[in-house]
Image (spheres, rainbow, N blue to C red):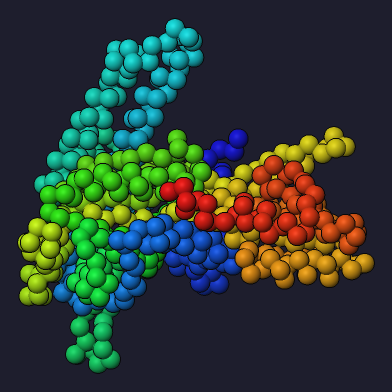
Amino acid sequence: MIAQEDLFKKLIAHSKEYGYIFQSSEIYDGLGAVYDYGPYGAELKKNIRDYWWKSMVLLHENIVGIDSAIFMHPTTWKASGHVDAFNDPLIDNKDSKKRYRADVLIEEFREKLHAKIEKEVEKARKRFGDAFDESQFRATNPRVLENQAKIDDLTQRFQDALEAENMGAIRDLIVENKIVCPISGTANWTDVRQFNLMFATKLGSVSEDASTIYLRPETAQGIFVNFLNVQKSARMKIPFGIAQVGKAFRNEIVARQFIFRMREFEQMEMQFFVRPGEELKWYEYWKEKRMNWHQSLGLGAEKYRFHDHDKLAHYANAAADIEFKFPFGFKEVEGIHSRTDFDLSAHQQHSGKKMQYFDPEINESYVPYVVETSIGLDRTFLMILSNAYQEEKIEKENGQVDERVVLRIPPFLAPVQLAVLPLVKKDGLPEKAREIMNELKFDFNCQYDEKDAIGRRYRRQDAIGTPYCITIDHDSLTDNQVTIRDRDTMSQERVSIDALRGILESKLAMRQYLAKL
Ligand code: ATP
Protein backbone atom coordinates (compact mmCIF):
# COMPACT_ATOMS: atom_id res chain seq x y z
CA MET A 1 0.00 0.00 0.00
CA ILE A 2 1.28 3.45 -0.89
CA ALA A 3 0.73 6.20 1.68
CA GLN A 4 -2.09 8.43 0.49
CA GLU A 5 0.01 11.60 0.29
CA ASP A 6 2.71 9.86 -1.70
CA LEU A 7 0.07 8.47 -3.95
CA PHE A 8 -1.25 11.91 -4.67
CA LYS A 9 2.20 13.25 -5.54
CA LYS A 10 2.81 10.30 -7.79
CA LEU A 11 -0.53 10.78 -9.44
CA ILE A 12 0.29 14.40 -10.29
CA ALA A 13 3.65 13.40 -11.78
CA HIS A 14 2.05 10.52 -13.67
CA SER A 15 -0.67 12.80 -15.05
CA LYS A 16 1.97 15.03 -16.55
CA GLU A 17 4.26 12.30 -17.85
CA TYR A 18 1.43 10.43 -19.55
CA GLY A 19 -0.38 13.36 -21.12
CA TYR A 20 -3.35 13.70 -18.78
CA ILE A 21 -2.87 17.06 -17.12
CA PHE A 22 -0.35 19.87 -17.50
CA GLN A 23 0.09 22.97 -15.40
CA SER A 24 -1.21 25.94 -17.40
CA SER A 25 1.50 28.10 -19.04
CA GLU A 26 4.14 25.86 -17.53
CA ILE A 27 6.99 27.46 -19.51
CA TYR A 28 6.25 30.66 -17.58
CA ASP A 29 6.27 28.75 -14.28
CA GLY A 30 2.55 28.14 -14.42
CA LEU A 31 -0.55 29.98 -13.35
CA GLY A 32 -1.95 29.08 -9.93
CA ALA A 33 -4.85 26.63 -9.90
CA VAL A 34 -5.25 26.65 -13.68
CA TYR A 35 -4.61 23.44 -15.61
CA ASP A 36 -4.59 22.15 -19.17
CA TYR A 37 -5.75 18.72 -20.24
CA GLY A 38 -3.37 16.76 -22.46
CA PRO A 39 -4.23 14.22 -25.17
CA TYR A 40 -5.46 11.49 -22.81
CA GLY A 41 -6.91 13.91 -20.30
CA ALA A 42 -9.03 15.56 -22.97
CA GLU A 43 -10.39 12.14 -24.03
CA LEU A 44 -11.21 11.04 -20.50
CA LYS A 45 -12.88 14.36 -19.77
CA LYS A 46 -14.95 14.13 -22.94
CA ASN A 47 -16.05 10.60 -22.06
CA ILE A 48 -17.12 11.59 -18.55
CA ARG A 49 -19.00 14.57 -19.98
CA ASP A 50 -20.73 12.30 -22.51
CA TYR A 51 -21.73 9.82 -19.85
CA TRP A 52 -23.25 12.56 -17.73
CA TRP A 53 -24.96 14.22 -20.69
CA LYS A 54 -26.43 11.00 -22.00
CA SER A 55 -27.60 9.92 -18.56
CA MET A 56 -29.44 13.22 -18.20
CA VAL A 57 -30.63 14.20 -21.67
CA LEU A 58 -30.98 10.90 -23.52
CA LEU A 59 -32.43 8.94 -20.64
CA HIS A 60 -35.00 11.53 -19.56
CA GLU A 61 -37.68 12.59 -22.00
CA ASN A 62 -38.30 15.62 -19.83
CA ILE A 63 -34.72 16.92 -19.75
CA VAL A 64 -33.20 18.96 -22.57
CA GLY A 65 -29.78 20.55 -22.89
CA ILE A 66 -28.58 24.04 -23.69
CA ASP A 67 -25.24 25.78 -24.18
CA SER A 68 -25.40 29.32 -22.86
CA ALA A 69 -22.70 32.01 -22.99
CA ILE A 70 -20.13 32.57 -20.27
CA PHE A 71 -20.77 36.33 -20.28
CA MET A 72 -24.15 37.44 -19.04
CA HIS A 73 -25.84 40.74 -18.37
CA PRO A 74 -24.35 42.08 -15.12
CA THR A 75 -27.76 42.35 -13.45
CA THR A 76 -27.92 38.55 -13.58
CA TRP A 77 -25.37 38.39 -10.80
CA LYS A 78 -27.04 41.08 -8.76
CA ALA A 79 -30.30 39.12 -8.96
CA SER A 80 -28.69 35.77 -8.19
CA GLY A 81 -27.08 37.18 -5.05
CA HIS A 82 -23.53 36.58 -6.23
CA VAL A 83 -22.52 40.25 -6.18
CA ASP A 84 -23.51 40.59 -2.54
CA ALA A 85 -23.11 37.15 -1.09
CA PHE A 86 -20.69 34.98 -3.04
CA ASN A 87 -17.95 35.28 -0.47
CA ASP A 88 -15.45 33.10 1.30
CA PRO A 89 -14.27 33.88 4.85
CA LEU A 90 -10.50 34.33 4.66
CA ILE A 91 -7.85 34.40 7.33
CA ASP A 92 -4.09 34.99 7.07
CA ASN A 93 -1.32 33.61 9.19
CA LYS A 94 0.95 36.54 10.04
CA ASP A 95 4.08 34.40 10.30
CA SER A 96 3.88 32.31 7.15
CA LYS A 97 1.91 35.00 5.27
CA LYS A 98 -0.27 32.19 3.95
CA ARG A 99 -3.95 32.70 3.38
CA TYR A 100 -6.62 30.16 4.29
CA ARG A 101 -10.34 29.73 4.11
CA ALA A 102 -11.48 29.93 7.72
CA ASP A 103 -14.31 27.47 7.12
CA VAL A 104 -11.89 24.95 5.64
CA LEU A 105 -9.54 25.20 8.65
CA ILE A 106 -12.46 24.45 10.95
CA GLU A 107 -13.74 21.65 8.71
CA GLU A 108 -10.31 19.99 8.75
CA PHE A 109 -10.00 20.31 12.50
CA ARG A 110 -13.38 18.62 12.88
CA GLU A 111 -12.21 15.80 10.60
CA LYS A 112 -9.18 15.33 12.88
CA LEU A 113 -11.44 14.94 15.91
CA HIS A 114 -13.46 12.38 14.00
CA ALA A 115 -10.30 10.51 13.10
CA LYS A 116 -9.29 10.41 16.79
CA ILE A 117 -12.58 8.75 17.67
CA GLU A 118 -12.23 6.19 14.91
CA LYS A 119 -8.69 5.42 16.08
CA GLU A 120 -9.93 4.72 19.62
CA VAL A 121 -12.63 2.44 18.24
CA GLU A 122 -10.17 0.54 16.08
CA LYS A 123 -7.74 0.11 18.99
CA ALA A 124 -10.50 -1.24 21.18
CA ARG A 125 -11.72 -3.55 18.43
CA LYS A 126 -8.27 -5.12 18.27
CA ARG A 127 -8.02 -5.38 22.06
CA PHE A 128 -11.41 -6.95 22.67
CA GLY A 129 -11.65 -9.09 19.55
CA ASP A 130 -14.96 -10.88 19.05
CA ALA A 131 -16.34 -9.65 22.36
CA PHE A 132 -16.20 -6.02 21.17
CA ASP A 133 -19.48 -4.14 21.46
CA GLU A 134 -18.92 -1.10 19.26
CA SER A 135 -22.06 0.85 20.06
CA GLN A 136 -21.54 0.41 23.80
CA PHE A 137 -17.93 1.52 23.46
CA ARG A 138 -18.94 4.62 21.52
CA ALA A 139 -21.58 5.45 24.12
CA THR A 140 -19.33 5.08 27.18
CA ASN A 141 -15.63 5.52 26.44
CA PRO A 142 -14.52 8.80 28.05
CA ARG A 143 -12.09 9.77 25.28
CA VAL A 144 -14.67 9.11 22.57
CA LEU A 145 -17.29 11.07 24.49
CA GLU A 146 -14.95 13.97 25.08
CA ASN A 147 -14.06 14.27 21.40
CA GLN A 148 -17.67 13.85 20.35
CA ALA A 149 -18.68 16.66 22.70
CA LYS A 150 -15.99 18.85 21.16
CA ILE A 151 -17.27 18.06 17.67
CA ASP A 152 -20.88 18.83 18.62
CA ASP A 153 -19.93 22.09 20.28
CA LEU A 154 -17.73 23.15 17.37
CA THR A 155 -20.40 22.27 14.82
CA GLN A 156 -23.09 24.21 16.64
CA ARG A 157 -20.98 27.32 17.19
CA PHE A 158 -19.65 27.25 13.64
CA GLN A 159 -23.16 26.96 12.26
CA ASP A 160 -24.37 29.85 14.43
CA ALA A 161 -21.43 32.03 13.39
CA LEU A 162 -22.05 31.34 9.71
CA GLU A 163 -25.73 31.99 10.10
CA ALA A 164 -25.07 35.35 11.76
CA GLU A 165 -22.15 36.09 9.40
CA ASN A 166 -20.16 36.74 12.53
CA MET A 167 -16.53 36.68 11.36
CA GLY A 168 -15.22 37.43 14.85
CA ALA A 169 -16.88 34.30 16.21
CA ILE A 170 -15.31 32.22 13.43
CA ARG A 171 -11.90 33.58 14.37
CA ASP A 172 -12.56 32.78 18.04
CA LEU A 173 -13.23 29.16 17.12
CA ILE A 174 -9.90 28.94 15.32
CA VAL A 175 -7.99 30.50 18.20
CA GLU A 176 -9.74 28.62 21.01
CA ASN A 177 -9.20 25.28 19.32
CA LYS A 178 -5.54 26.11 18.83
CA ILE A 179 -5.78 25.55 15.09
CA VAL A 180 -2.36 26.41 13.70
CA CYS A 181 -1.01 27.21 10.26
CA PRO A 182 0.44 24.01 8.77
CA ILE A 183 3.41 25.98 7.41
CA SER A 184 4.48 28.16 10.35
CA GLY A 185 2.92 26.04 13.08
CA THR A 186 1.68 29.19 14.83
CA ALA A 187 -1.75 30.55 15.72
CA ASN A 188 -0.80 34.14 14.89
CA TRP A 189 -3.93 34.91 12.86
CA THR A 190 -5.39 38.05 11.30
CA ASP A 191 -9.10 38.85 11.44
CA VAL A 192 -11.45 36.90 9.22
CA ARG A 193 -12.59 38.86 6.14
CA GLN A 194 -15.13 38.19 3.43
CA PHE A 195 -13.82 37.98 -0.13
CA ASN A 196 -15.92 37.90 -3.33
CA LEU A 197 -15.03 35.06 -5.67
CA MET A 198 -16.19 36.46 -8.99
CA PHE A 199 -13.77 37.57 -11.70
CA ALA A 200 -14.72 40.91 -13.17
CA THR A 201 -13.79 42.35 -16.54
CA LYS A 202 -14.92 45.16 -18.83
CA LEU A 203 -17.22 44.89 -21.81
CA GLY A 204 -16.63 47.39 -24.60
CA SER A 205 -13.50 48.92 -26.08
CA VAL A 206 -13.56 52.41 -24.64
CA SER A 207 -13.04 52.27 -20.95
CA GLU A 208 -15.41 55.17 -20.20
CA ASP A 209 -18.45 53.41 -21.67
CA ALA A 210 -17.36 50.01 -20.57
CA SER A 211 -19.46 48.25 -18.01
CA THR A 212 -18.28 45.67 -15.52
CA ILE A 213 -19.25 42.16 -16.37
CA TYR A 214 -18.35 38.90 -14.68
CA LEU A 215 -17.06 35.56 -15.76
CA ARG A 216 -19.87 33.27 -14.65
CA PRO A 217 -19.13 31.54 -11.33
CA GLU A 218 -21.72 28.84 -12.09
CA THR A 219 -23.52 27.67 -15.22
CA ALA A 220 -26.93 27.62 -13.54
CA GLN A 221 -27.87 31.24 -14.21
CA GLY A 222 -27.68 30.72 -17.98
CA ILE A 223 -30.37 28.11 -17.48
CA PHE A 224 -32.58 30.26 -15.26
CA VAL A 225 -32.65 33.26 -17.59
CA ASN A 226 -33.54 30.94 -20.49
CA PHE A 227 -36.19 29.05 -18.58
CA LEU A 228 -39.14 30.32 -20.62
CA ASN A 229 -37.30 30.24 -23.97
CA VAL A 230 -36.59 26.57 -23.44
CA GLN A 231 -39.97 25.71 -21.98
CA LYS A 232 -41.79 27.26 -24.93
CA SER A 233 -39.50 26.27 -27.78
CA ALA A 234 -39.12 22.67 -26.67
CA ARG A 235 -42.74 22.46 -25.45
CA MET A 236 -41.76 21.27 -21.98
CA LYS A 237 -44.27 20.51 -19.26
CA ILE A 238 -43.48 20.71 -15.58
CA PRO A 239 -41.73 18.77 -14.12
CA PHE A 240 -38.87 19.18 -16.58
CA GLY A 241 -35.15 19.79 -16.52
CA ILE A 242 -32.54 21.79 -18.40
CA ALA A 243 -28.98 20.47 -18.50
CA GLN A 244 -25.79 22.25 -19.37
CA VAL A 245 -22.05 21.63 -19.32
CA GLY A 246 -19.66 24.54 -19.38
CA LYS A 247 -16.87 26.56 -17.90
CA ALA A 248 -17.23 28.43 -14.63
CA PHE A 249 -14.73 30.74 -12.95
CA ARG A 250 -14.03 31.44 -9.30
CA ASN A 251 -11.19 33.43 -7.84
CA GLU A 252 -10.43 30.71 -5.30
CA ILE A 253 -7.98 31.99 -2.75
CA VAL A 254 -6.81 28.74 -1.37
CA ALA A 255 -6.19 26.80 -4.50
CA ARG A 256 -4.32 23.63 -3.68
CA GLN A 257 -4.93 19.97 -4.29
CA PHE A 258 -4.35 19.91 -8.00
CA ILE A 259 -7.53 19.95 -10.09
CA PHE A 260 -9.75 19.61 -7.02
CA ARG A 261 -10.02 23.36 -6.67
CA MET A 262 -9.38 25.39 -9.81
CA ARG A 263 -9.96 28.98 -10.81
CA GLU A 264 -11.29 27.92 -14.20
CA PHE A 265 -13.26 24.69 -14.19
CA GLU A 266 -16.15 22.92 -15.82
CA GLN A 267 -19.53 22.21 -14.30
CA MET A 268 -22.25 19.81 -15.34
CA GLU A 269 -25.50 21.17 -14.02
CA MET A 270 -29.15 20.27 -14.33
CA GLN A 271 -31.97 22.45 -13.07
CA PHE A 272 -35.22 20.61 -12.59
CA PHE A 273 -38.36 22.79 -12.52
CA VAL A 274 -41.20 21.54 -10.35
CA ARG A 275 -44.50 22.57 -8.84
CA PRO A 276 -44.14 24.58 -5.60
CA GLY A 277 -44.53 22.23 -2.67
CA GLU A 278 -43.20 19.22 -4.58
CA GLU A 279 -39.57 20.24 -4.38
CA LEU A 280 -38.54 18.09 -1.43
CA LYS A 281 -39.93 14.97 -3.08
CA TRP A 282 -37.85 15.74 -6.18
CA TYR A 283 -34.85 16.62 -4.04
CA GLU A 284 -34.91 13.10 -2.57
CA TYR A 285 -35.43 11.66 -6.02
CA TRP A 286 -32.38 13.41 -7.48
CA LYS A 287 -30.21 12.61 -4.49
CA GLU A 288 -30.84 8.93 -5.11
CA LYS A 289 -30.51 9.19 -8.90
CA ARG A 290 -27.20 10.98 -8.72
CA MET A 291 -25.78 8.58 -6.14
CA ASN A 292 -26.74 5.72 -8.47
CA TRP A 293 -24.89 7.40 -11.31
CA HIS A 294 -21.76 7.59 -9.18
CA GLN A 295 -22.07 4.00 -8.07
CA SER A 296 -22.43 2.89 -11.68
CA LEU A 297 -18.81 3.91 -12.24
CA GLY A 298 -17.79 0.95 -10.10
CA LEU A 299 -15.33 2.80 -7.86
CA GLY A 300 -16.80 1.19 -4.73
CA ALA A 301 -19.94 2.08 -2.80
CA GLU A 302 -17.96 2.58 0.43
CA LYS A 303 -16.03 5.46 -1.15
CA TYR A 304 -19.14 7.68 -1.21
CA ARG A 305 -21.22 9.42 1.42
CA PHE A 306 -23.81 12.18 1.66
CA HIS A 307 -23.04 15.28 3.65
CA ASP A 308 -25.90 17.57 4.60
CA HIS A 309 -25.04 21.26 4.62
CA ASP A 310 -24.53 23.02 7.97
CA LYS A 311 -25.46 26.33 6.49
CA LEU A 312 -27.87 26.53 3.61
CA ALA A 313 -26.87 28.91 0.83
CA HIS A 314 -28.97 32.03 0.48
CA TYR A 315 -31.16 30.31 -2.12
CA ALA A 316 -31.72 26.82 -0.71
CA ASN A 317 -34.24 25.04 1.53
CA ALA A 318 -32.39 21.72 1.47
CA ALA A 319 -28.91 20.80 0.27
CA ALA A 320 -26.57 17.84 0.37
CA ASP A 321 -23.19 17.02 -1.10
CA ILE A 322 -22.10 13.74 -2.51
CA GLU A 323 -18.61 13.23 -1.13
CA PHE A 324 -15.94 10.90 -2.42
CA LYS A 325 -12.98 9.48 -0.57
CA PHE A 326 -10.07 11.20 -2.34
CA PRO A 327 -6.47 10.44 -1.31
CA PHE A 328 -6.77 13.55 0.91
CA GLY A 329 -10.05 12.50 2.54
CA PHE A 330 -13.79 12.67 1.90
CA LYS A 331 -14.55 15.76 -0.20
CA GLU A 332 -17.44 17.12 -2.22
CA VAL A 333 -17.82 16.13 -5.87
CA GLU A 334 -21.43 17.09 -6.40
CA GLY A 335 -24.12 19.20 -4.77
CA ILE A 336 -27.86 18.56 -4.85
CA HIS A 337 -29.77 21.69 -3.91
CA SER A 338 -33.38 22.55 -3.51
CA ARG A 339 -33.19 26.19 -4.62
CA THR A 340 -36.87 27.05 -4.12
CA ASP A 341 -38.17 29.78 -6.47
CA PHE A 342 -35.33 32.04 -5.37
CA ASP A 343 -33.58 32.46 -8.72
CA LEU A 344 -36.61 32.73 -10.99
CA SER A 345 -38.35 35.15 -8.62
CA ALA A 346 -35.21 37.27 -8.35
CA HIS A 347 -34.86 37.43 -12.14
CA GLN A 348 -38.55 38.25 -12.44
CA GLN A 349 -38.09 41.10 -10.02
CA HIS A 350 -34.87 42.49 -11.51
CA SER A 351 -35.88 42.14 -15.18
CA GLY A 352 -39.52 43.07 -14.82
CA LYS A 353 -40.34 40.04 -17.04
CA LYS A 354 -42.70 37.32 -15.88
CA MET A 355 -40.93 34.05 -15.11
CA GLN A 356 -44.10 32.07 -14.67
CA TYR A 357 -45.39 28.83 -16.00
CA PHE A 358 -49.04 28.09 -16.70
CA ASP A 359 -49.76 24.61 -15.43
CA PRO A 360 -52.62 23.21 -17.53
CA GLU A 361 -53.19 20.33 -15.12
CA ILE A 362 -54.15 22.54 -12.24
CA ASN A 363 -55.11 25.60 -14.27
CA GLU A 364 -52.72 27.86 -12.38
CA SER A 365 -49.72 30.08 -13.10
CA TYR A 366 -46.77 30.02 -10.77
CA VAL A 367 -43.03 30.58 -10.51
CA PRO A 368 -41.64 27.03 -10.50
CA TYR A 369 -39.41 25.66 -7.75
CA VAL A 370 -36.04 24.24 -8.70
CA VAL A 371 -34.01 21.25 -7.63
CA GLU A 372 -30.52 21.26 -9.09
CA THR A 373 -27.77 18.73 -9.42
CA SER A 374 -24.37 20.35 -9.83
CA ILE A 375 -21.26 18.29 -10.40
CA GLY A 376 -17.71 19.40 -11.19
CA LEU A 377 -16.36 17.72 -14.31
CA ASP A 378 -12.75 18.21 -13.22
CA ARG A 379 -13.47 16.86 -9.75
CA THR A 380 -15.16 13.82 -11.24
CA PHE A 381 -12.09 13.38 -13.41
CA LEU A 382 -9.85 13.55 -10.33
CA MET A 383 -12.11 11.10 -8.52
CA ILE A 384 -11.80 8.57 -11.33
CA LEU A 385 -8.09 9.11 -11.91
CA SER A 386 -7.01 9.02 -8.27
CA ASN A 387 -9.03 5.88 -7.75
CA ALA A 388 -7.52 4.32 -10.87
CA TYR A 389 -3.84 4.80 -10.07
CA GLN A 390 -2.18 1.63 -8.80
CA GLU A 391 1.33 0.32 -8.48
CA GLU A 392 1.62 -3.44 -8.68
CA LYS A 393 4.28 -6.06 -8.29
CA ILE A 394 4.10 -8.88 -10.80
CA GLU A 395 5.84 -12.22 -10.42
CA LYS A 396 7.39 -13.29 -13.65
CA GLU A 397 7.79 -16.89 -14.78
CA ASN A 398 11.53 -16.83 -14.06
CA GLY A 399 10.80 -15.84 -10.45
CA GLN A 400 11.83 -12.21 -10.87
CA VAL A 401 9.51 -9.48 -9.71
CA ASP A 402 8.42 -6.82 -12.13
CA GLU A 403 6.53 -3.63 -11.38
CA ARG A 404 3.83 -1.87 -13.26
CA VAL A 405 1.78 1.27 -12.87
CA VAL A 406 -1.74 0.75 -14.06
CA LEU A 407 -4.65 3.13 -14.37
CA ARG A 408 -7.78 1.15 -13.70
CA ILE A 409 -10.10 3.62 -15.34
CA PRO A 410 -13.60 2.21 -15.94
CA PRO A 411 -13.05 0.64 -19.40
CA PHE A 412 -15.92 2.47 -21.10
CA LEU A 413 -14.42 5.83 -20.11
CA ALA A 414 -10.78 5.03 -20.94
CA PRO A 415 -9.09 7.51 -23.32
CA VAL A 416 -7.62 4.75 -25.47
CA GLN A 417 -9.85 1.73 -25.49
CA LEU A 418 -7.79 -0.58 -27.64
CA ALA A 419 -4.11 -0.85 -28.48
CA VAL A 420 -3.29 -2.64 -31.71
CA LEU A 421 0.16 -4.23 -31.52
CA PRO A 422 1.94 -6.23 -34.21
CA LEU A 423 4.34 -8.61 -32.46
CA VAL A 424 7.19 -7.60 -34.76
CA LYS A 425 7.70 -4.80 -37.22
CA LYS A 426 8.00 -7.06 -40.28
CA ASP A 427 6.65 -10.14 -42.09
CA GLY A 428 3.38 -8.43 -42.95
CA LEU A 429 2.27 -8.13 -39.30
CA PRO A 430 2.08 -4.29 -39.34
CA GLU A 431 -0.10 -4.46 -42.45
CA LYS A 432 -2.43 -6.98 -40.84
CA ALA A 433 -2.58 -4.82 -37.69
CA ARG A 434 -3.45 -1.71 -39.72
CA GLU A 435 -6.17 -3.63 -41.51
CA ILE A 436 -7.78 -4.58 -38.19
CA MET A 437 -7.41 -1.09 -36.83
CA ASN A 438 -9.03 0.41 -39.91
CA GLU A 439 -12.08 -1.71 -39.20
CA LEU A 440 -12.29 -0.89 -35.50
CA LYS A 441 -11.33 2.77 -35.41
CA PHE A 442 -14.85 3.96 -36.22
CA ASP A 443 -16.23 2.51 -33.00
CA PHE A 444 -13.33 2.53 -30.58
CA ASN A 445 -10.51 4.89 -29.78
CA CYS A 446 -7.58 2.75 -30.99
CA GLN A 447 -3.86 3.30 -30.76
CA TYR A 448 -1.33 1.61 -33.01
CA ASP A 449 2.10 0.84 -31.55
CA GLU A 450 4.92 -1.21 -33.07
CA LYS A 451 7.90 0.20 -31.16
CA ASP A 452 9.83 -1.82 -28.52
CA ALA A 453 9.34 -5.31 -27.16
CA ILE A 454 5.75 -6.36 -26.56
CA GLY A 455 6.14 -6.33 -22.76
CA ARG A 456 7.16 -2.68 -22.78
CA ARG A 457 4.28 -1.80 -25.02
CA TYR A 458 1.88 -3.47 -22.57
CA ARG A 459 3.38 -1.40 -19.72
CA ARG A 460 2.89 1.81 -21.70
CA GLN A 461 -0.74 0.94 -22.30
CA ASP A 462 -1.23 0.01 -18.61
CA ALA A 463 0.17 3.39 -17.64
CA ILE A 464 -2.36 5.26 -19.75
CA GLY A 465 -5.15 2.91 -18.70
CA THR A 466 -5.93 1.15 -21.99
CA PRO A 467 -8.30 -1.68 -21.03
CA TYR A 468 -7.50 -3.99 -23.97
CA CYS A 469 -4.52 -4.73 -26.17
CA ILE A 470 -4.59 -7.01 -29.18
CA THR A 471 -1.43 -8.61 -30.45
CA ILE A 472 -1.05 -9.73 -34.04
CA ASP A 473 1.50 -12.55 -34.45
CA HIS A 474 2.66 -14.77 -37.29
CA ASP A 475 -0.17 -17.24 -36.72
CA SER A 476 -2.68 -14.42 -37.12
CA LEU A 477 -1.85 -14.36 -40.85
CA THR A 478 -3.04 -17.91 -41.29
CA ASP A 479 -5.54 -18.65 -38.50
CA ASN A 480 -7.18 -15.19 -38.56
CA GLN A 481 -6.93 -14.93 -34.78
CA VAL A 482 -5.31 -12.44 -32.42
CA THR A 483 -4.49 -12.38 -28.72
CA ILE A 484 -6.54 -10.04 -26.59
CA ARG A 485 -5.05 -8.96 -23.27
CA ASP A 486 -7.02 -7.61 -20.35
CA ARG A 487 -5.44 -4.64 -18.52
CA ASP A 488 -6.72 -5.57 -15.07
CA THR A 489 -6.16 -9.33 -14.98
CA MET A 490 -3.36 -9.37 -17.58
CA SER A 491 -4.94 -12.57 -18.86
CA GLN A 492 -4.67 -13.28 -22.56
CA GLU A 493 -7.09 -15.01 -24.80
CA ARG A 494 -6.99 -16.00 -28.44
CA VAL A 495 -9.98 -14.79 -30.40
CA SER A 496 -11.10 -14.68 -34.00
CA ILE A 497 -10.54 -11.34 -35.75
CA ASP A 498 -14.10 -11.46 -37.04
CA ALA A 499 -15.43 -11.68 -33.48
CA LEU A 500 -13.34 -8.76 -32.19
CA ARG A 501 -15.83 -6.03 -32.76
CA GLY A 502 -18.59 -7.89 -30.93
CA ILE A 503 -16.29 -8.76 -28.03
CA LEU A 504 -15.10 -5.19 -27.64
CA GLU A 505 -18.62 -3.87 -27.93
CA SER A 506 -19.73 -6.11 -25.09
CA LYS A 507 -16.90 -4.88 -22.89
CA LEU A 508 -16.67 -1.21 -23.78
CA ALA A 509 -19.99 0.16 -24.88
CA MET A 510 -21.32 3.04 -22.76
CA ARG A 511 -24.77 1.78 -23.64
CA GLN A 512 -24.58 -1.02 -21.07
CA TYR A 513 -23.76 1.38 -18.28
CA LEU A 514 -26.55 3.71 -19.32
CA ALA A 515 -28.99 0.81 -19.49
CA LYS A 516 -28.33 -0.01 -15.84
CA LEU A 517 -29.04 3.49 -14.56
P1 ATP B 1 -16.52 23.95 -2.36
O1 ATP B 1 -17.27 23.91 -1.05
O2 ATP B 1 -15.59 22.80 -2.57
O3 ATP B 1 -15.92 25.28 -2.67
P2 ATP B 1 -19.03 24.58 -3.56
O4 ATP B 1 -19.96 24.01 -2.54
O5 ATP B 1 -18.76 26.03 -3.61
O6 ATP B 1 -17.63 23.78 -3.50
P3 ATP B 1 -20.87 24.40 -5.71
O7 ATP B 1 -21.04 25.86 -5.83
O8 ATP B 1 -21.97 23.59 -5.10
O9 ATP B 1 -19.48 24.09 -4.98
O10 ATP B 1 -20.49 23.84 -7.15
C1 ATP B 1 -20.91 22.57 -7.60
C2 ATP B 1 -19.74 21.69 -7.98
O11 ATP B 1 -18.81 22.39 -8.80
C3 ATP B 1 -18.93 21.22 -6.80
O12 ATP B 1 -19.50 20.08 -6.22
C4 ATP B 1 -17.60 20.92 -7.43
O13 ATP B 1 -17.57 19.60 -8.00
C5 ATP B 1 -17.50 21.90 -8.55
N1 ATP B 1 -16.61 23.01 -8.16
C6 ATP B 1 -16.91 24.09 -7.43
N2 ATP B 1 -15.85 24.89 -7.28
C7 ATP B 1 -14.83 24.30 -7.95
C8 ATP B 1 -13.47 24.64 -8.18
N3 ATP B 1 -12.95 25.75 -7.71
N4 ATP B 1 -12.71 23.78 -8.91
C9 ATP B 1 -13.23 22.65 -9.41
N5 ATP B 1 -14.50 22.28 -9.22
C10 ATP B 1 -15.31 23.08 -8.51
Query: Residue lying farthest front?
Result: 361
* Label total for image: 0
**Does residue 199 show up?**
no
Q: What's the residue at 26%, 82% (across, down)? A: 202
Q: Is residue 104 left or right of residue 281?
A: right
Q: Is residue 286 left or right of residue 359?
A: right
Q: Is residue 119 above or below residue 314?
A: above
Q: Which picture quadrant has residue 432? A: bottom right
| Depth order, front residue of 135/93 | 135
Q: What's the residue at 7%, 75% (across, down)? A: 352
Q: Is residue 250 left or right of residue 301?
A: left
Q: Which picture quadrant has residue 265? A: bottom left
| Depth order, front residue of 446/35 | 446
Q: Is residue 349 above or below residue 514?
A: below
Q: Residue 36: x and y, percent?
A: 50, 67
Q: Residue 385: x and y, percent?
A: 53, 51
Q: Is residue 485 above or below residue 48?
A: above
Quarter that holds the N terminus: top right
Q: Is residue 308 left or right of residue 39?
A: left
Q: Residue 479: x and y, percent?
A: 88, 57
**Does residue 145 show up?**
yes
Q: What's the residue at 26%, 84% (across, down)? A: 203
